Image (tube, rainbow, N blue to C red):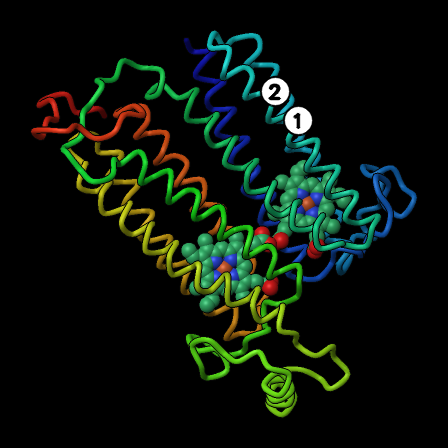
Amino acid sequence: MTGYNNLHRFALFTACATFLLIIAGGLVTSTQSGLSVPDWPNTYGHFMFAYPLDQMVGGIFFEHSHRMIASVVGLLTVLLALWLWRREERPWVRNLGFAAVGIVMLQGLLGGLTVLFLLPTAISVSHATLAQTFFAIVVALALFTSPWWRGELPRLIERDRSISVTRLCMIATGAVYLQLILGALMRHLSAGLAVPDVPLAYGQIFPSLSPDALSGYNHELIVRDLRLSADDPVTAGQIVAHLAHRYWALATSGLIVWTAVRLIGLREASPRFRTIGVVLLALVALQITLGVMTVVTQKAVDLTTAHVATGALILALCVLATLHTVRLYGLQRSAPSVAFTPRGAAAA
Ligand code: HEM
Ligand code: HEM
């Protein structure tokens, strides 16, 4: 059992390393260092691990260190899968370990391809989205190998509700996932500053996208020193991409708050629900603040990267919330009749 607990600790460590990798990747995009190293898998013709440290300056520092951290995470993932293969009895957990290896390899390939093809939007967006998916999978592996998940737990039945807590958590997770894709699309379509004011957009809720309105917006951006006249003009597509992320943030945040409040209400079933609910509320407040600050500070590198990283944390926490509800309540709808939560059956 001690050996298995070490396996769980190793899964946790891999999840933490992946979180660092997401920050490192976010820094590559935020500092626009994606093409600072033009070749792949080599770095300026050197075998990656033999690249001279004193040449890791400027954008090369961000891009090359991102590749190095990614290699470490790739290695950790392979070790985790092998360890699971040796020690894990549940076939589906072993398979998930191997799936994680497949995903991290695909992710590395997308990273390399985005460099070789000069950062095409589709590949960069896929790389950004798969990064968050991979993080959520490693976090789930850490949960599946935890003593809590493997221990004896009561099967609870939730009080009659129009929507079960499990389903609510799933919907919130789906909404966050869509929000991440919209964020990645906006980021890689260079639409992060396509709307310079917040909460309104060019002083309106739904700004006009007529050619006259667009040329007015572009004129305003140049007069306010937010863009140079030599820059490409902001297009209707960029404004739509930007606003899709902003408006979907409202729906997503509403769903997260609803889910968090519902989880906190289930604290007697498991104190874990309270913790997850409270942290979700804190993270969503932080994320909206960081999103607004990203626009207001015209994409300050630290705040923008923190916004990407907090997005990954919110996704992972929503996945954790869903898995906790599945573990304790199963996939069934809420009970059709009287409330029933076994007393004294609280799961730690
Ligand atoms: C294997 C695990 C990897 C993970 C989890 C990962 C994660 C990330 C993340 C989260 C971003 C930021 C995306 C964004 O902010 O929109 C990023 C950007 C980037 N990554 Fe990776 N990455 C990995 C491997 C690699 C590899 C092997 C390369 C090889 C070249 C690479 C090259 C890049 C580049 C060039 C960018 C910037 C893309 C752009 O600005 O359009 N990544 N990565
Ligand atoms: C629940 C709420 C939100 C979540 C989960 C979220 C998540 C994200 C994520 C993950 C990204 C980066 C995607 C990637 O490339 O990997 C992103 C980008 C961005 N988000 Fe959000 N976001 C939220 C709310 C907001 C709000 C309210 C605003 C502003 C009013 C905002 C403004 C931005 C901007 C401007 C970017 C692009 C930054 C750039 O171009 O570099 N976000 N968001």
Query: Residue 210, how many percent across, how many down?
Result: 59, 81
Q: Is residue 187 left or right of residue 40?
A: left
| Residue at horizontal 44 percent and vertical 64 percent from the top | 247
Q: CA distance from mark 2 to mark 1?
A: 6 Å
Image location (x, y in percent) of residue 82 = 61, 14
Judge: label 2 CB < 8 Å from ligand 1: no
Answer yes or no: is residue 168 visible: yes
The residue at which mark 1 appears reads as 102
In the image, taking residue 235 as reference, residue 322 lies left or right, namely left
CA neighbours of label 2 inside 10 A, class few (<14), some (14 to 19), many (20+): some
Residue in the image at 41% along x and 8% along y? 1
Other-residue count near label 1 (Cα within 10 Å), few / some / many at <14 / 14–19 / ≥20: some
Residue type pointed to by label 1: Gly
**Front one among 246 and 318:** 246
| Residue at screen point 51% across, 67% down | 243
Across and down, in percent, residue 320 comes to: 38, 34
Identify the residue under disc 2. Answer: 98
The answer to whether marks 2 and 1 mark residues whose Cβ atoms lie closer than 8 Å is yes
For the point 63% across and 68% down, the residue is 237
Percent coordinates x, y for residue 173 in the rendering: 41, 42
The answer to whether 337 is drawn above or below residue 296 in the figure is above
Looking at the image, the residue that sits furthest to the front is: 210
Depth check: 17 or 113 in front?
113
Tally the numbered discs: 2
Quarter holding the C terminus is: top left
Eyeballing the image, is 100 above or below 276? above
**In which image quadrant can residue 101 be found?**
top right
Residue 25 visible within the image:
no
